[in-house]
Amino acid sequence: MSRNAAEALRDPITTVAEQGILARLALRQIGALRILATLVFIVVGFLAASFSWKLPLFGAAERTLYDVRVVATAPSVDQDPRVVMVVFKDETLEHTQHRSPLDRALLAKALTQIDALGPKAIGIDILVDEPQPEDDQLVAALRGMRTPTHLAFASNATNSDDEQLWQEAYERQFQARLAGSQSSAASIRVLKEDNGVVRRWPTHAPNEPPLLALAMGPHNPAFEGYQGGLRFRRAKFVDRPLYAEFPIDLFSQPFTASLFKRFIAGRYVLVGADISDIDRVGNPATALNLEKPPPGLKVHADLLSQVLDGRIETQISGWARVLTTLLVVLAGALTGVIKVRPVWNEVFLGLQLAFVAVLPFTLQGLGFDTWHTPQFGWAVGWLIAYTATSAAARAVGAEQRNYAQSALGKYLPRDVAAQILRDPSQMALHGERREIYALFSDLQGFTEMTHGLEPEVVASLLNAYLDLLSQAVLQHGGTIDKFVGDAVVAFWGAPIARPDDGERAARAAIAMWRVGEAFRKTPMGDHPPLGRTRVGLHRGLAIVGNFGGEGRISYTALGDVMNTASRLESANKTLETRLLISREALPPAMLPDFRAMGRIGLRGRSTPVEVFEYAVDFPAEARDRLNDAYARFDSGTLSALDEIRALAAEHDSDVALANLVRRLESAGPGGTYRLG
């Protein structure tokens, strides 16, 4: 029966029992206090998200995200043909020599000429809140208007910083003189944030006339008490602003005014100021430093165009925001504890990211009012909940890993224990065929040396030595199979295979030899010096898995590759080398660090093995000469052996090189020297 079939036939009751045991274990390990702390953090995350618009810094972030949404979803439109702005410019002030208040005589003349051109309505965003000699002329012009005309009004109650009580009193007195005419008062109130940005419709204050945009436009009950977002639009063309704008000077005389009749007739005309340092108002684009603040008159033009289009943003209910916030925070909490495959984890995270990042933009683009939608709060709440539950999960995971190591023993590598913890079915006895890099090490003469030492000294030396070698294996991603006395058995390629396993294994072999040499040369009291560390490394197929009885199992590798690696370690003694790697295991990129040691036949193996030695103290130039000469000799060039003899003579203390010469003389080109 196949492994999959066997797993499919597992007793469902047993499976449920295992899951129940793990769940009870997790709850017991996490503890009541930790559960309470986690719940507190989740609640904090929910509250932070829910009230993010009212919290310091959070509120600024929310407003910035709102501005980004508004600008990103704003339609690009051509110039609005319904609304025209007639303005006092900086050049007008220079010409009239009037700055504050603006020249009311020029205003009176312009209003008379504009009225004659047949506009639909006129709105004046200029306050008459202090007496001037030209007031009678302006009153006469306003009383003579045939077009519905609306004069700006501001009260001290809603604009105490700019409008004093005596100024409001003069406004009311002046506008009382217009009674019975086509001219009436209209509120020019706008809702500015602390940084001077206008994003929302203003509320209608008691005892004030209607808003200028509502007074000028057609009556629409939907805008009565409307406090939603002010619609933001972008100009489609750089050289064509959203609203046509003309200097008021052009309308002071009948002839020049008549030239602009086609721009005025049947349109809504807003009269005000477009002066570089007066009444500049921010919007979402200016808040993001995407454009310069426009004149305040443009805000009234935006309000008016929104009224003309009847564009009311759909309000999102408070309950919808609360439920969505709760969903986001719970999703963060679940993400911190759910264990799924990495690909599904990425999908799950991607969906949540898309939800938080895209949903508010989508709603804004569909005409919903996303003011007070806590997009930044969602992200913070999600992060707090995720951090709280993932921290608890990590704590539980650590406890479970300790439990697994206690239950399984100390013979399994940490990653294998973690893998079994994630998938308990791997406790079943089965194996799989994998290509691995097998490594054996041995400490020369240690067994003989232990006969003359106290057991405590032997244990201390051996533990210190094996600890150093184990660290070298684990630091390079290897799996420690077992310890056999002073020998270490390890492999790469299982249970997790990596593309660079070969290089990891080779570098681990070098590191083990180095730390062995360092340990050997370290003074350690009155005992004989330790021998050299010998290492053998080979690559091949093995059966890897859990082997043993149900009461005691071992994760290990079986097969020719293990036997060959063991034989290579032993061959170091005969070849008088220290670290042998087979041709199959040697990464090509590391070949320059190794020197050829010929082809040898191993006991119990019919296929010979070509081996290389790590020779750190052998000059690089000599290694290159040796490897080149060996390759030519192995291909049949007999004279290359003389070059190898010459190298051996140059390095007469190199016993491994002299040993190679003897073996090559015995085996001949392409031959194999069989070890006993």
Image (cartoon, rainbow, N blue to C red):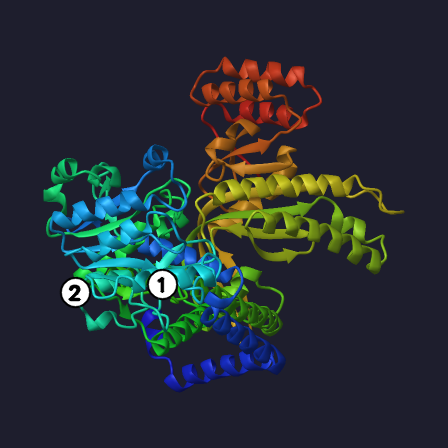
Mark 1 nearby-residue class (10 Å; few <14, some 14–19, many ≥20): few
Q: Are marks 2 and 1 in contact (CB under 8 Å)?
A: no
Q: Is residue 209 left or right of residue 404?
A: left
Mark 2 nearby-residue class (10 Å; few <14, some 14–19, many ≥20): few
Residue under circle 2? 218
Q: Nearer the viewer, residue 424 or 152?
A: 152
Q: Give the quadrant of residue 635.
A: top left
Q: Is residue 167 left or right of residue 439?
A: left
Q: Residue at x 47, y 43 (%)?
A: 500
From this view, report whether residue 550 is shown above or below residue 440.
below
Residue under circle 1? 173
Q: Earlier in the sequence, mark 2 or mark 1?
A: 1
Q: Secondary structure at mark 1?
A: helix
- Quadrant of the image for the N terminus? bottom left
Q: Residue at x 12, y 39 (%)?
A: 258
From this view, report whether residue 231 is shown above or below residue 274.
below
* Residue 391, disc: none
Residue 162 place in picture, x, y as percent: 46, 56
Q: Is residue 260 left or right of residue 172?
A: left
Residue 324 place in picture, x, y as percent: 37, 73
- Quadrant of the image for the C terminus? top right
Residue 184 place in picture, x, y as percent: 25, 63
Q: Give the quadrant of residue 156.
A: bottom left
Three-letter code for the amino acid on which mark 2 is drawn: Pro
Three-letter code for the amino acid on which mark 1 is drawn: Gln
Residue 197 place in picture, x, y as percent: 40, 54
Q: CA distance from mark 2 to mark 1?
A: 28 Å
Q: Residue at x 16, y 65 (%)?
A: 218
Q: Nearer the viewer, residue 179 or 510?
A: 179
Task: Tell me, yes or no, if residue 544 can be seen here.
Answer: no
From this view, report whether residue 320 is shown above or below residue 125.
below
Q: Nearer the viewer, residue 77 or 244?
A: 244
